Amino acid sequence: MKRIFFLTALLCLVPAYAAPGTNVYDVEVLVFENRIPELEGSELWTAERNRPPVPEPSTTAAYGAAVGDLALKNAAAALERAGQYRVLVHQRWRQAAEEKSATKPVWLRNPDGQMEGSFRFYMSRFLHVDLDLILREKSGDAAGVNYRLAEHRRVKTQELQYFDHPKLGVLVRITQAGKD
């Protein structure tokens, strides 16, 4: 009887140890333009000439289709209502967290092409995000000014990440798939 009890208990415990942890995540990104001129201060935030260009769309990968509700939809609505911000991109997709060399950036672009750039999510001991966005501000017939937000950051699931720039803001929310 003890042997049957022991085998039953062992069989109940094995799936808990044998089941690998999921490395699939839901990634949600909300990019918005800041239209408050007094926040710019006296600094000039133009794109630097010596920096490498934003990766071309041909180097990007399409991950799983949009999943579920957008968790940041209330934030997007509040930004739009405020009138001092304009939502440029709001996307959500599902992808596996793999090594940096195995992941390709997701191309983010607003419909009028004023903002575009790459977003890379990967695992390297911890979860990481690489963000490289360009906002093109046109002024009449002239080419205008380019503003760049390029940042690398270690991220945690279930935490809201905010990437800040005087002209751009990015909210990122990463959750394990199915754990919203």
Image (cartoon, helix red, strand yellow):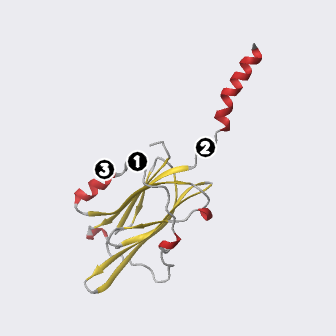
Residue, disc 2: 21
Q: Dot 1 corresponds to which residue? A: 68
Gap in angstroms between the C-alphas marked 3 and 2: 31 Å
Report whether 98 appears left or right of 49: right
How many dots with numbers? 3
Q: Which residue is mark 3?
A: 74
Q: Amino acid at mark 2?
A: Gly
| Disc 1 to disc 2, C-alpha distance | 22 Å
At 37% from the left and 50% from the top, the residue drawn is: 70
Residue 87 placed where, x, y %?
31, 62
Give the mark, 1 or 3, whose residue is nearer the N terminus.
1
Where residue 125 sits: x, y (%)? 62, 54
Q: CA distance from mark 1 to mark 3?
A: 15 Å
The quadrant of the image that shows the C terminus is top left
Q: Amino acid at mark 3?
A: Asn
- Look at the numbered discs 3 and 2 and tell me whether their residues touch, using CB distance below 8 Å: no
Q: Secondary structure at mark 2?
A: loop
Say which label, 3 or 2, has the lower sequence index.
Answer: 2
Q: Residue at x 47, y 72 (%)?
A: 57
Foreground mark, 3 or 2? Answer: 2
Q: In the figure, 137 relative to 141: above or below?
A: above
Lower position in the chain sequence, tag 1 or tag 2: 2
Residue placed furthest toward the top: 1
